[in-house]
Amino acid sequence: MTRQIIVDLDEGTAQELERVAPSRARKRSEFVRRALRQALNAEAERRMADAYRQKPDDAEPELIDPAAWEPRKSSTRGRRRDR
């Protein structure tokens, strides 16, 4: 789903946008979408960084035991089965 919005630009910004992404080539909408996405991602990153600064992760890094991630070997290996 898409939503159309109207944005007012000052004359200088509008002229620069026309030079970079002319409307007749249909590049303008894609350019604006990408610029907005980049700005929104940067804002999300800034907020996350602020949140970590306000409440840092003070926990000591836990040591990881690689054996805990290995599949368990069958306990019957090496044992003789009574038949």
Image (tube, rainbow, N blue to C red):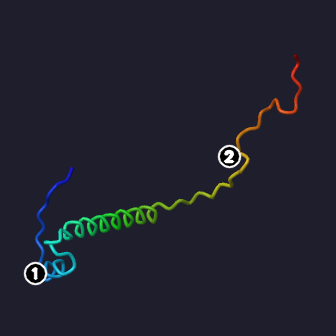
**Badge 1 amino acid:** Glu
Depth check: give the residue in front, 37 or 40: 37
Depth check: give the residue in front, 32 or 65: 32
Res 29 quadrant in image: bottom left
Give neighbour class at mark 1: few <14, some 14-19, many 20+ (Cα, 10 Å).
few
- In this picture, is 41 found above or below 75? below
Percent position of residue 72, x then y? 73, 38
Residue at the spot 11% in from the left edge and 64% down from the top edge: 6
Give neighbour class at mark 2: few <14, some 14-19, many 20+ (Cα, 10 Å).
few
Q: In this view, does 78 lie to the left or right of 22?
A: right
Q: Which mark is residue 67?
A: none
| SS at mark 2 in the image | helix
Q: In this view, does 15 lie to the left or right of 57?
A: left
Q: Does label 1 or label 2 sit earlier along the sequence?
A: 1
Gap between marks 1 and 2 measured at Cα? 60 Å
Depth check: give the residue in front, 80 or 5: 80
Percent position of residue 37, x then y? 29, 64
Residue at the spot 32% in from the left edge and 67% down from the top edge: 38
Res 58 quadrant in image: bottom right
Disc 1, disc 2: CB below 8 Å? no
Depth check: give the residue in front, 57 or 12: 12
Percent position of residue 25, x then y? 17, 71
- In this picture, is 67 found above or below 7? above
- Tell which residue pokes out farthest to the top in this image: 83
Q: Name the residue under label 2.
A: 69
**Badge 2 amino acid:** Trp
Residue at the spot 89% in from the left edge and 26% down from the top edge: 80
Q: Name the residue under label 1.
A: 11
- In this picture, is 59 found above or below 22? above
